[in-house]
Amino acid sequence: MFLVIFRNRKRADIDAAAYGADATRMEAMARAQPGFVSFKSYTADDGEVIALSEWADAEAARAWGSQPDHAVVQARGRAEYYQDYTLYTCDQPRTHRYERPGK
């Protein structure tokens, strides 16, 4: 498993409709990529967003990161959408699970 954490804040003057369209398209494309496992996004009360994507391995995540349409939207994000962001990656994270019996 390879985990990508994208922590970001949007600009105050963001074109929300354009961002929403790009985000929807990028999520659909990511889900179709070989090695894609899951994606979830959470927004805090202060507007910070944490987006988590899980991939089969580092190669699959890197392939998505360099996919040509994704690269174009990444550049647009830096120019038009994000105030700041940090990208974290983790290969083979230590995982602990709990499931309530009788689920």
Image (cartoon, rainbow, N blue to C red):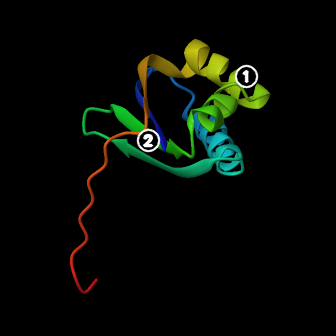
Q: Residues within 10 Å of mark 1 (few under 14, many from 20)?
A: few
Determine whether, in the image, residue 39 is placed left or right of residue 59: left
- Residue 37 location (% of width, % of height): 56, 52
Q: Residue furthest top?
A: 79
Above or below, comparing residue 19 to residue 53 in the picture: above
Residue 11 in the image: x percent, y percent? 45, 20
Nearer the observer: mark 2 or 1; the answer is: 2
Residue linked to disc 1: 72
Given the current orientation, which residue lies at the most extreme bottom position? 102
Q: Quadrant of residue 65?
A: top right
Q: CA distance from mark 2 to mark 1?
A: 20 Å
Residue 22 x %, y %: 65, 36
In-image side of 58 versus 86 (left or right): right
Residue type indicated by callout 1: Val
Residue pictured at 24% horizontal, 87% vertical? 102
| Residue located 63% across and 33% down the image | 59
As helix, strand or loop, the secondary structure at mark 1 comes to helix
Quadrant in the picture for residue 48: top left
* Element class at badge 2: strand
78 left or right, relative to 69:
left
Q: Amino acid at mark 2?
A: Leu
Crowding near the residue tagged with mark 2, few <14, some 14–19, many ≥20 C-alpha atoms within 10 Å: some
Query: Which mark identifies residue 88?
Result: none
Mark 2 highlights which residue?
Answer: 52
Which is nearer the eye, 46 or 29? 29
| Quadrant where the image shows the C terminus | bottom left
Instruction: Please name the residue shown 32% across and 33% down the image.
Output: 47
